[in-house]
Amino acid sequence: MRIWRFLLKILGYKITTSFPEIPKSIIVFAPHTSYWDAVIGKLVMKVWGVPHHFLGKKELFRFPMVIIVRLLGVIPIRGIKGHNSIYDAVNVLNGKDRMHLAICPEGGFAPTNRWNPGFYYMAVKAQVPIVVAYIDYGRREGGVKGVITDLSDLNKVYQQLSEMYRGVTARHPECFQLPTRPGGGKK
């Protein structure tokens, strides 16, 4: 873990919180406006020592990017014929005693306030909490904003996410919008 902390320090980042003592979760990592988010996010996860995988769009799995995403532990999701990514994620979680799946529900780098709700449905079906993690480029820090355990209302979860991410600065602030409602696409 020292090497990961050292690399974060070289990049000018610190970790402000420890990871909660829970065996499994869906981790929402935001903001997501740059490929650097994955690199810094991976370093943060390594410092925490949390067994994890990232979920990423299948479009990332083309040469030469496939080499990097495989090294980062990314699992392809979305648009794979014959696969339901929600059930795939649930099966990954259910197959391990300790596992955390990190996802960026914004979906891409374009600004959107309609974050993909797949993370929510994964957490509900796997019966695991949602850990709200962040990278703040303004403060040069990463950490956990909180844990959402009440998954009874999707809109309430989105409201909590919006409150937790308020004030967090993205690498490209013009591309980060707080979630206001579930869905995909730009608004």
Image (tube, helix red, strand yellow):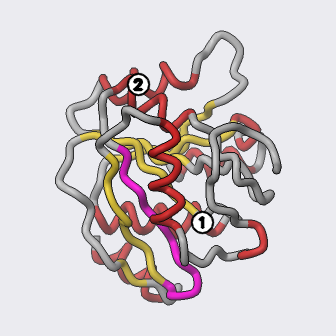
The amino acid marked with disc number 1 is: Asp
| Residue 106, label in figure | none
Q: Secondary structure at mark 1?
A: helix
Q: Which quadrant of the view contains residue 128?
A: top left
> Closer to the camera, 8 or 66?
8
Where, by quadrant of the figure, is residue 117 drawn?
Answer: top right
The residue lying furthest to the left in this view is 21
Residue 90 circle label:
2
Question: Does residue 85 show up magenta in the picture?
Answer: no
Give the mark nearest the N terminus, 2 or 1. Answer: 1
| Looking at the image, residue 85 lies above or below residue 168 | above
Span colored in magenta:
130-140
> Which residue appears at 61% of the width and 15% of the height?
83
Q: CA distance from mark 2 to mark 1?
A: 24 Å
Residue 148, relative to residue 77: is it above or below? Answer: below
Q: Amino acid at mark 2?
A: Val
